[in-house]
Amino acid sequence: MTRRALLAAAFLVVAAPAVVARQSGDASPQDTQTTRRRVGLALGGGSARGLAHVGVLEWLEEHRIPVDVIAGTSIGGLVGGGYATGRTAAEVRDLIEAIDWDAMFQGEVEYAQKAFRRKEDRRDFPVRLELGLRDGLRLAPGLDPGHYIGLFLSRLVLPFAAPLDFDDLPIPFRAVASDLEAAVAVELDSGSLAAALRATMAIPAIFEPIEIGQRLLADGGLLNNVPADVTREMGAEVVIAVDVSAPLGDREALRSLVGVANQAIGVMMVARTRQVLDDHANHVIRPVVDDISANGWRRFEEIRQRGYAAAAALADRLAPLSLDPVAWDRHVAKRRRRRPAASVEPAFVRVDGVDADVAADIGRRLEPEIGGALDPVELERRLTTLAGAGRYGSLGYDVVREGERAGLAVHVREKSHGPPFLNLAFELDNRADAVERGFGARLTAYDVGGRDTEARVDLTLGSDLGLEAEYLRPIAGSSLFVAPRIGLRSRTQQFALESDPIASFRTQRAQAGGDLGVTLGATSELRVGYDIGVVDARVRVGTPVLPPVQGREHGARLRWVYDGHDDWIVPSRGTRLVTEVRWLVEAPEQSRDLRQATLDSATFMSVGDAGRIFVALAGATSFGDAASPFYQFTLGGPFRLGAFELDQFRGSHTAYVGGGYMHRLGRLPDLVGGPIHLVGWLESGSAFETPRDAVVHSDLSGGLLVETLMGALLVSGSIGDDGSGAFYVALGRPFW
């Protein structure tokens, strides 16, 4: 046998096992770290469709395919950034599974975490869109300031300190964003990793753009949706790209102006993506997610599985990239060693984004976070409390280092459109025989004439009219305050005889007064005050069954509000209670002083994940005094005996009890609205002069309650115990 033949035989003996491995479907492992090709991963944008990236990562890990560099755009940046920090695919999956998507995309600080006065704003002026008057009237640059997603990203990058060279991560990483002013794609390779991820995910008009350095950055998908070219520039010899781009619409979708506009944007993005993939990607994984909407975040498990399946479909092509078990263990161990210790003990707090005095105040509030192991949950609670005051759009944080000391850098992003702020309300009440419309606006200005002061001006137009102003000033920086106020109000009062409306009176008031009060955290406020004014009530429509009323009105009041609800429309838990005691020293048509008290409460409890039960109690009394018709209490209308006419029952005293069940059916798209609930309730009540005269009325009601961008929408029907019934549509303020 010749020497060449011997060499050939020896080669076959050595190579045979590898050939058998390939034929049996086992990956042909790259058995050395020094000779294998560098593998890069390019994860594309696609909103919720990008959750498929998690499944792709799981498949790659299961088949021991290493990832040496990652570039990500938008949701691909979030998933890729989480993986680049040294987490396993399973840890990334667990991280995303734990996200509360309702909170993440609700567009504002959760109701329970708002300051007390911001809760009042949300209830009284419920239109979600907040206008600002800084440099003219304008909207915020995005529907969501990104507070919660910013906190999530700050926690995701722990314990890495900023500024950071992204090549120093366990897996070198790039986030791709779009410069809105220069119209160029920006590869973020250093600085704050949390800020970089926030920038690549800043979908225009949805999330506010992020300023990094001198650039104003938004979602990278605008200019480079699947950054395979960036991955190649990072030194990848084999580029695996995952494309979850939104599909183009069909001919039917192009029949509208919006459809054509969306298609035009999509065509530009698709053309750029195709070019990048053709030029730079060796393998393209395309999960089957065309039927997943952009806000399908709650379908994570299904989307993840589709990503896994799409990677598995390319198994034959990806198999040669697999490492043998020993090499894989070495690769994972090396990646793990590049991750710093998880524990961080901040020794200082540094605040940026606001002036020195405000930064010092925020720093003092965060001092409890210094000196021990960092508790991200507690830190984020404190930051959210600051955001709940309404002055700032979002607050985030990074770990930073000064020499050997670790600390916290807190980044405050002020709202660019205000203060002052303008909150709106639109109201619609629709019964079978009447439609009432209303509009309201509240102008709020901060620090007018002093630190932490607040000036309000409320305007009401429609069936009721009003112009009121209040100036709240804290006393010596404490929770105590004084609040002088002045107002003009004009409201319609209905009078009925045996359920038949007979007259509508216009009651006008001009008042001035003030309160001394205390704010008790985010849930409670107590006020005592005195008002003086004049009243004029005259018939507007119908039979003048009562004479005109005119004269002076003045007296004292004590008011306490406790709001323990965790949501302003359909709470999952908590009690809200409003009680007021009033002593009118002088009032028209009252022969003597008038003492009155009112109480309203609503308690909610969760039943499973989708159910709520609630109990509402209300009562009012004039004690031993007889109230004139214009000072009587009323019942009638939704959640106050809905089968009967508005204010049908009238008396010096009232009593009401109601209870029911709500079941969540679904929800409107994120940032447009919230949950949709089916609701049914039973209620009873009476308005009377003496307990012996009390006649109890009851009804059964049911309908839909929806959280919308414009407020609470109720569509309901009621049947009364006397056979009366009503169909009701209401949009605007909550009902408790």
Image (cartoon, rainbow, N blue to C red):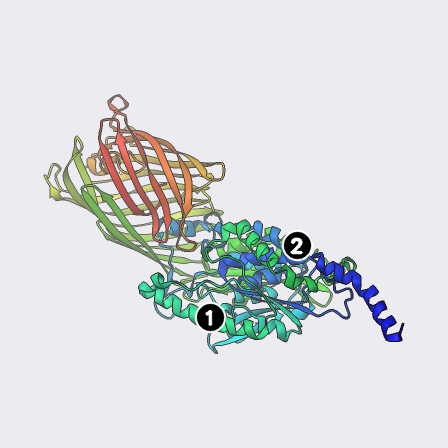
Residue 234 image-quadrant placement: bottom right
| Residue 106: x %, y % from top left | 45, 53
Residue 80 image-quadrant placement: bottom right
Q: Nearer the viewer, residue 577 or 662?
A: 662
Query: Quick check: 312 left or right of 577?
Result: right
**Label drawn at residue 269:** 1
Q: Nearer the viewer, residue 401 or 236?
A: 236
Q: Amino acid at mark 1?
A: Met
Residue marked by disc 2: 374
Q: Quadrant of the N terminus?
A: bottom right
Figure check: 490 above or below 274:
above
Q: Amino acid at mark 2?
A: Leu
Residue 364 seen anywhere in this rendered image of the structure: no
Toward the front, the furthest residue is: 1
Residue 654 seen anywhere in this rendered image of the structure: yes
Considering the numbered disc 2 on the image, is that residue within a helix, a strand or a loop?
loop
Q: Residue at x 38, y 59 (%)?
A: 130
